[in-house]
Amino acid sequence: MFILEKPYVSDLLKDTLGKIGMPVLENKVAREVFKDRSISFSTQKEFIEAYNQDRNQPVYSNSENAIDWIDNNLNSGDLPQKIRLFKDKGAFRDLVRDMYPDFFYRTVKFEELDSVKADDLPIPCVIKPCVGFFSLGVHMVESIEGWQQAVEAIKNEVEQIKTMYPAKVLELDNFIIEQCIEGEEFAVDAYFDAEGNPVIINILGHLFASSDDVSDRCYITSTEIINKHHDEFLNLLQEIGKRAELNNFPIHIELRTDGRGNIGVIEVNPMRFAGWCVTDLAHFAYGINPYEYFMGGLKPDWSNISGCCDGKVYGMVIGEIDSAVDRSKIKSVDYEGFKANFSKPLELREIDYREYPVFAFIFAEVDADNMDELQRMLHADFTQYLNIE
């Protein structure tokens, strides 16, 4: 069962839904997406009735914007509670508290941020909304002075951020302060099958421009990354799935590992794989259709996949728009110029920059021994591709 919502529905997802014939909720976004295609929708009543007949069947949404609808309509089972467990970072920290007994975290209300004493915090630390998305409202604090700067920045951002996403996706009433988790950062697309066993669809390495960078600008995947981290990440997922009693449940989990078996969970995003259909990177890299794999309970044969893709790295870069830019004054975007940064682009997605602070997503292939094209993107000024009045 599929629920489509903003901000983005990819061609791969559209094609998949047209092919597999599973129920797609009829809503405004779905009608717009398929206005030029033929697809059979399920009315709200039909969708709810089909779900209630089998509450253990897989349900997928491309966006957490669907959470509000699920809360109000698919609440005969425990799906809303399981979603909330992961959306609320404080609740998730409570779930795994004994797994990380020395890990510092503290929740605080927005209006109480000024009363927090920086001397009481384990600096460096990070502050972010308890319920958040897309690095919005996330700030790294690397000094006592930096704490007050972060608080002021959050105050300035709150009203603007509220206009971008529904409240169930991004709640700005409560924030969580956490100690920094050391190590390399990764994002994992995975699902729990009908028996509760975790299945990894893809592992993405998160590249950063600097130690205080918290953006989502660039992610990469390769068979080297998969082979190195698959088993240790799978063990962690098994423990989380057991505690939360998950089955037929997709997640996108962000974590850090120090390479010595110590893994720290940053956050878990429920009901979906990588947002904005970035999960499609598995398709471009390995021929894995994430939506078909989840719905069909399929498992990647990583031993065979590795032989096809060795020596290659597959990257995703977000064409971010700096917050200082007035997006209403952007007349056009040089998409071809942005695409020209890569010798082997796989897909360029043009995004409505009037609605979101992003003008494009691009997928590309590079050689593992020469990642200059991706590294340059980490420090690039993307305003050069914007034609501003």
Image (tube, rainbow, N blue to C red):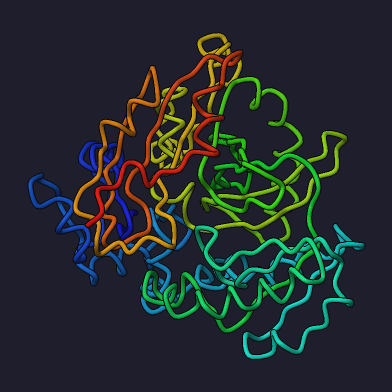
User: Is 143 positioned to the left or the right of 296 in the image?
Assistant: right
User: Is 118 positioned to the left or the right of 129 in the image?
Assistant: right
Considering depth in this image, is 376 or 364 the residue closer to the camera?
Answer: 376
Quarter of the image with the N terminus is bottom left
Q: Is residue 209 above or below residue 86?
A: above
Across and down, in percent, residue 263 comes to 80, 45
Across and down, in percent, residue 377 comes to 49, 35
Q: Residue at x 81, y 60 (%)?
A: 124
Q: Residue at x 46, y 35 (%)?
A: 316
Across and down, in percent, residue 129 comes to 60, 72
Q: Is residue 3 above or below residue 209?
A: below
Q: Is residue 355 above or below residue 206?
A: below
Considering depth in this image, is 360 or 134 the residue closer to the camera?
Answer: 360
Residue lying farthest to the top in this orientation: 307
Across and down, in percent, residue 70 comes to 40, 71
User: Is 262 positioned to the left or the right of 225 in the image?
Assistant: right
User: Is 371 positioned to the left or the right of 237 in the image?
Assistant: left
The quadrant holding residue 280 is: top left
